[in-house]
Image (cartoon, rainbow, N blue to C red):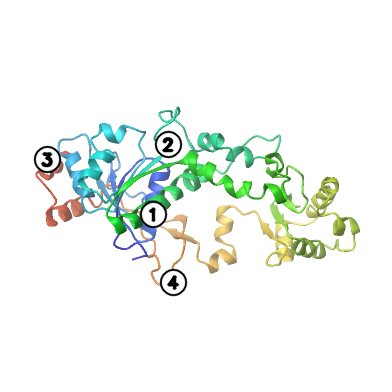
């Protein structure tokens, strides 16, 4: 069930964004076969491994005799492959793009790395923060003079990596269905994180005086575009950029008769002092009190919520964004489709839960060669 029903993806399970990409495609209805390594805990419940949800899991020891051939038989009917190894590893295993595309010319070979398939750093170890730092995105997301921190895993692994790989795979599948020609998708978290900066760059002339420095959070101390601390220790955010939304904000705060607030929205010399006054004002009430006053208005206001709080927010409840499956809080598939909605979330499959089923399908389809006898002994 879902908009990608009929699309088959083979995922060589690795770390981080590759499995997230596979989960996203499975959420949308693709048949994602996750090829997992032998490991302790096979067959045991793992409800917290959300990036495995919606997939079919098989265990395959790729170093055992016949395993490579079985893997290749899996891709015989596949639209795409996902792998997240360091550059050159799949080639050394005998599963590189030359081998796979020769066997399945229409295959979209999706490669997920941090630094990319080539370049001076391509063989170096790294994680989300490393790729985001080198791309320029971490600097741009950091308060001036503060320690550079970003939400863990979101800018690099998910946004710059998994989502770009998913777009690349789907675009490649569309192309292959036109002309039958597959190709390699080189999705690097570094590339994706850097590419997202185009959104910020587009605002430089009009909003930030052409300066990257001025585009950083609170670089200019704009009192209408920043978080504020409340009386109870909670935080809120206002981002009333447009004049009409700013006017609504100061009206609801009772400041619309103060000519400094009325006239100085675009006056950088006034931002620091007006920000100090708003800081003092917002500390006079709790986050809940400010939410009752400002939420749902055109003040561009939001409370800063932890995930558990977000799950209980009426708007998120109305949209059914958060779900609890097997005691684990998680979010529903996105985006949404009017004709082919995604299926309901179910339990995460145990590691290897579908090994016999998938191998039986290969045999039934006539693609399962002599290797299966060796694999059944070696898995």
In contact (CB < 8 Å): disc 3 and disc 2: no
Look at 82% across and 45% down and name the residue there: 272
Look at 52% across and 46% down and name the residue there: 154
Q: Earlier in the sequence, mark 2 or mark 1?
A: 2
The residue pinned by badge 1 equals 171
Spatial CA distance of label 2 from label 4 is: 36 Å
The residue pinned by badge 4 equals 338
Give the farthest residue toward the front. Answer: 179
10 Å neighbourhood of mark 2: few (<14), some, or many (≥20)?
Answer: many
Q: Which mark is residue 374?
A: 3
The residue pinned by badge 2 equals 116
In contact (CB < 8 Å): disc 4 and disc 1: no
Spatial CA distance of label 4 from label 3 is: 46 Å
Picture coordinates of residue 55, whole percent (x, y): 32, 54
Question: Residue 93, relative to residue 330: is it above or below?
Answer: above
Spatial CA distance of label 4 from label 1 is: 21 Å
Q: Which mark is residue 243?
A: none
In contact (CB < 8 Å): disc 2 and disc 1: no
Which part of the image, by quadrant, shows the N terminus? bottom left
Q: Earlier in the sequence, mark 3 or mark 2?
A: 2
Spatial CA distance of label 2 from label 1 is: 19 Å
Q: Secondary structure at mark 1?
A: helix
Look at 74% across and 61% down and name the residue there: 289
Q: Earlier in the sequence, mark 3 or mark 1?
A: 1
Q: Secondary structure at mark 4?
A: loop
Report the mark closest to the observer, 3 or 2.
2
């Amino acid at each position: 069930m879902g908009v990608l029903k009929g699309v088959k993806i083979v995922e060589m399970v690795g770390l981080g964004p590759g499995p997230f990409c596979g989960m996203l495609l499975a959420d949308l209805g693709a048949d994602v076969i996750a090829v997992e390594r032998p490991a302790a805990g096979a067959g045991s419940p793992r409800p917290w491994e959300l990036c495995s949800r919606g997939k079919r899991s098989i265990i395959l020891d790729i170093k055992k005799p016949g395993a490579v051939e079985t893997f290749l038989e899996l891709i015989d009917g596949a639209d795409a492959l996902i792998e997240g190894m360091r550059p050159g590893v799949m080639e050394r295993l005998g599963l590189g793009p030359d081998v796979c595309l020769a066997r399945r010319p229409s295959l979209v070979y999706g490669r997920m790395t941090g630094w990319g398939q080539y370049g001076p750093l391509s063989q170096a170890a790294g994680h989300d923060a490393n790729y985001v730092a080198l791309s320029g995105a971490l600097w741009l997301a950091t308060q001036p003079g503060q320690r550079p921190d970003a939400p863990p895993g979101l800018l690099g692994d998910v946004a710059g990596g998994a989502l770009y790989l998913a777009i690349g795979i789907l675009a490649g599948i569309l192309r292959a269905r036109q002309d039958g020609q597959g190709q390699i998708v080189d999705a690097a978290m570094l590339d994706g994180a850097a590419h997202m900066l185009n959104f910020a760059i587009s605002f430089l002339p009009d909003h930030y005086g052409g300066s990257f420095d001025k585009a950083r959070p609170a670089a200019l101390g704009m009192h209408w575009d920043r978080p504020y601390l409340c009386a109870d220790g909670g935080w809120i955010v206002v981002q009333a950029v447009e004049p009409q939304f700013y006017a609504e904000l100061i009206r609801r705060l009772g400041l619309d008769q103060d000519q400094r607030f009325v006239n100085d929205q675009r006056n950088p010399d006034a931002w620091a002092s007006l920000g100090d006054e708003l800081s003092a004002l917002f500390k006079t009430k709790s986050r809940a009190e400010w939410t009752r006053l400002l939420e749902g208005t055109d003040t561009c206001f939001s409370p800063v919520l932890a995930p558990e709080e977000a799950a209980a927010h009426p708007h998120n409840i109305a949209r059914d964004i958060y779900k609890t499956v097997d005691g684990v809080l998680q979010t529903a598939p996105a985006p949404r489709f009017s004709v082919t909605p995604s299926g309901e979330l179910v339990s995460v499959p145990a590691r290897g839960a579908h090994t016999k089923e998938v191998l039986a399908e290969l045999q039934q389809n006539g693609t399962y060669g002599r290797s299966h006898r060796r694999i059944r002994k070696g898995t």
